[in-house]
Image (spheres, helix red, strand yellow):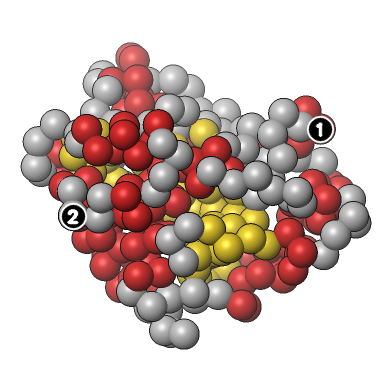
């Protein structure tokens, strides 16, 4: 990846002060779609629930949600209904396979493609309503740097960037990290590499991206941003089988290499959040 190949980073939303970030909230995001972000979020939630924690996955991809597809759920009530006053938060929260809770968003909602003041206020009301009830809240955001995605990420104490080894994924991950450093004054982003072909891929890719970040990206505080590898999830045929069956990998084949990698990731996330067991 060269400097010439890196896309410019825009500024769709104003900077968000770090004081607005919520403890126990982790944004699972990506620069590019199709890298397995929702798969990681859902199975990470299941792995954390296995460790005795109360976990909620909030589908923050408000317009193109697919967490329900991954979990084979058919919700009657979603965040859209909460926002419009048709139901309460309690009524919209569902129990998912894997022992965790979910708050799903609607799909194909054009009105949620832009961050209006109303959507911002309703989203804030929802997340402040759920955070006190759980040890860990995972925000399954959309991909990229839209204002809706960046707003959701801005609320999280920690950012978990999901990427694959493909050049397009890495380039988009860099662009997203650059925006997070510039707009949100992020000093640290955590990286998990999905579909890794070999052990150590996360460290190697983190080193590569860190070199580019050190050269081209400085936050408003003047300090460089750090990229911390959280491990890799290997290419594993069991992943595709679970996705096609709309099953959690942690439920279907918890002993497969990819599931073991997610279990290790959960252990690292647990140390970061230091939640209190239920």
User: Which residue is painted at 49% across and 53% down in the image?
Assistant: 27
* Nearest to the observer: residue 111 or residue 148: 111
* Nearest to the observer: residue 96 or residue 14: 96
Residue 103 horizontal side relative to residue 159, left or right: right
Task: Give the mark nearest the N terminus, 2 or 1.
Answer: 1
Label 2 SS: loop
Residue 152 at what x, y percent from top left?
Answer: 61, 50
Q: Point out the residue furthest to the top here.
A: 4
**Whole-number angstrom distance, CA of label 2 to CA of label 1:** 42 Å
User: In the rendered view of the protein, which quadrant contains the N terminus?
Assistant: top left
User: Which residue is painted at 24% across and 28% down in the image?
Assistant: 165
- The residue that disc 1 covers is 111
Quadrant housing residue 134: bottom right
Quadrant housing residue 164: top left
Residue 19 visible to an observer of this rendering = no
Q: Is residue 212 above or below residue 59?
A: above
Residue 210 horizontal side relative to residue 57, left or right: left
Residue 130 at what x, y percent from top left?
Answer: 66, 69
User: Which residue is painted at 41% across and 69% down in the image?
Assistant: 49
Mark 2 vs mark 1: in front = 2
- The residue that disc 2 covers is 255
Residue 172 visible to an observer of this rendering = yes
Q: Is residue 17 above or below residue 219?
A: below
Residue 212 at what x, y percent from top left?
Answer: 27, 33
| Residue 54 image label | none
Q: Point out the residue furthest to the left here.
A: 199
């Amino acid at each position: 990846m060269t400097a010439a190949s890196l896309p410019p980073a825009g500024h769709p939303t104003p900077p968000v002060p770090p004081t607005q970030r919520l403890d126990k909230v982790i944004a699972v995001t990506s620069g590019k779609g199709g890298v397995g972000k929702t798969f990681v979020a859902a199975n990470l939630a299941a792995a954390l629930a296995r460790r005795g924690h109360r976990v909620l996955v909030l589908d923050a991809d408000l317009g193109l949600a697919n967490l329900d597809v991954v979990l084979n759920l058919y919700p009657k009530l979603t965040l859209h209904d909460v926002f419009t006053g048709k139901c309460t938060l309690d009524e919209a929260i569902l129990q998912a396979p894997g022992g965790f809770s979910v708050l799903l968003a609607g799909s194909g909602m054009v009105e949620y493609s832009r961050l209006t003041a109303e959507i911002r206020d309703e989203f804030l009301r929802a997340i402040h309503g759920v955070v006190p009830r759980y040890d860990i809240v995972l925000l399954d955001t959309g991909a990229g740097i839209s204002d809706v995605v960046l707003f959701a990420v801005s609320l999280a104490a920690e950012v978990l960037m999901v990427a694959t080894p493909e050049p397009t994924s890495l380039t988009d991950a860099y662009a997203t990290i650059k925006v997070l450093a510039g707009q949100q004054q992020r000093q640290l982003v955590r990286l998990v590499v999905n579909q890794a072909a070999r052990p150590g891929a996360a460290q190697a890719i983190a080193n590569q991206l860190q070199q580019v970040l050190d050269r081209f990206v400085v936050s408003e505080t003047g300090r460089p941003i750090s990229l911390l590898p959280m491990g890799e999830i290997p290419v594993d045929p069991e992943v595709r089988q679970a996705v096609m069956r709309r099953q959690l990998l942690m439920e279907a084949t918890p002993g497969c290499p990819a599931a073991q990698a997610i279990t290790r990731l959960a252990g690292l996330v647990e140390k970061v959040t230091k939640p209190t067991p239920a």
